[in-house]
Image: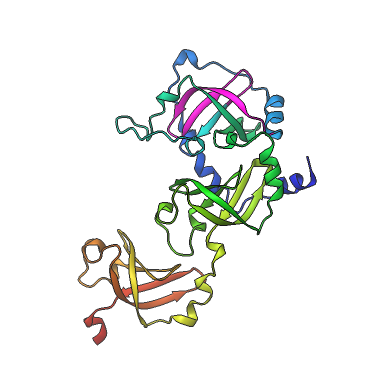
Amino acid sequence: MSNKLKQAAAGSLPDESWWSSILTDGEAGGAGLSTEDQYILVIDWDWVLKQYQDDQILVLTVTGHNRGGLLVENSHIRGFVPLSHLVDLPEKNPHTQFNHNLDAYLGRSLDLKIIECCAENERIVLSERAALSAPGQRLELLESLTTGSIVPGQVSTVTKFGAFVDLGGVEGLIHISELSWGRVAHPSEILSPGDQIEVYIVDLDIERCRVALSTKRLLPNPWDTVDEHYHPDAVVDAVITSIVGYGAFARLHAGLDGLIHISEFEGHPQHPGDVVTVGQQVEVRILHIDTNRQQLGLRLHTVKDELI
């Protein structure tokens, strides 16, 4: 292992939940396997680690599926392919308890690469997307990347927790919290599959082939200068960006969102949606600014409010 690999392996990502969220659904249990098919497979870990370190393409058979992806194996290995790492994500099937129809994959052979293996937890994660690049290309590309650099990429998949970006043979993840300085309800509000973008590399874990990315860090943080432009009791223009049960979020300008709590609505409505709609232009009064927590408290500005 090179010195760079050893140094990367010693580090840790800012937030392990970024990656564990990918597998949450997939670890819930199996489907598509009959009782007689559930035999004990002795995994050849020496073989697995060799294939992983050499970045080899493997041909594995789909033996089952669960809510999060596919179960695959051959005579040496049994592992899991998350939905987000399939080249062609299957259509949603409203007639089953699962979000997607994975039955068509049963018995098929897939070209895959190992993107994570942990003998201690007996967990092996594979990717069909990663297998689109030539053997060894992943390692070459990973060793060329550096934390803090800005690189081009193409959005490959958008999920509820973020967006995967193909960097030319390696996929990185932009967690939803790294998409914008403002509040993002769903990553699809900002990115779509196929988008060509530039990304900032937050962190690298070469040993586990994990690249944490950001788009918000390419832009100035509006919270750094919020006190220069806004102050409590000021009345400013805003746009309603989302509505939740406890209030509505309003955007003062790009990356700067505040909350109008439901208690701040005149007439005490049962739901904020009874008063405002997403996209509506409104005037708001700034109640408080907390730069440390990056929070703005707002109230809808009304004629009655003007007289107070």
Which image quadrant is residue 301 in? bottom left
Image quadrant in which the N terminus is located: top right
Q: Is residue 44 above or below residue 203?
A: above
> Residue 206 placed where, x, y %?
68, 44
Residue drawn 65% across and 50% down? 204
Q: Is residue 253 above or below residue 189?
A: below
In this rendering, position of residue 13 left or right of residue 28: right
Residue 25 in view (yes/no): yes
Residue drawn 68% across and 29% down? 51
Whether the magenta-drawn stretch holds residue 65 is answered as: yes
Image quadrant in which the C terminus is located: bottom left
Residue drawn 46% across and 49% down? 161
Tell me which secondary structure the magenta stretch mostly adopts.
Answer: strand
Residue 308 in view (yes/no): no
Which residue range is magenta in the image? 55-78
Q: Is residue 236 above or below residue 217?
A: below
Report the coloring of the rendering: rainbow
Which image quadrant is residue 31 in? top left
In this rendering, position of residue 4 left or right of residue 288: right
> Residue 60 placed where, x, y %?
57, 23
Q: Is residue 263 above or below residue 102?
A: below
Question: Which residue of the protein is positioned furthest toward the bottom in this rendering?
Answer: 307
Whether the magenta-drawn stretch holds residue 15 is answered as: no
> Residue 153 placed where, x, y %?
56, 51
Q: Residue 189 versus residue 210: which sits nearer the camera?
A: 189
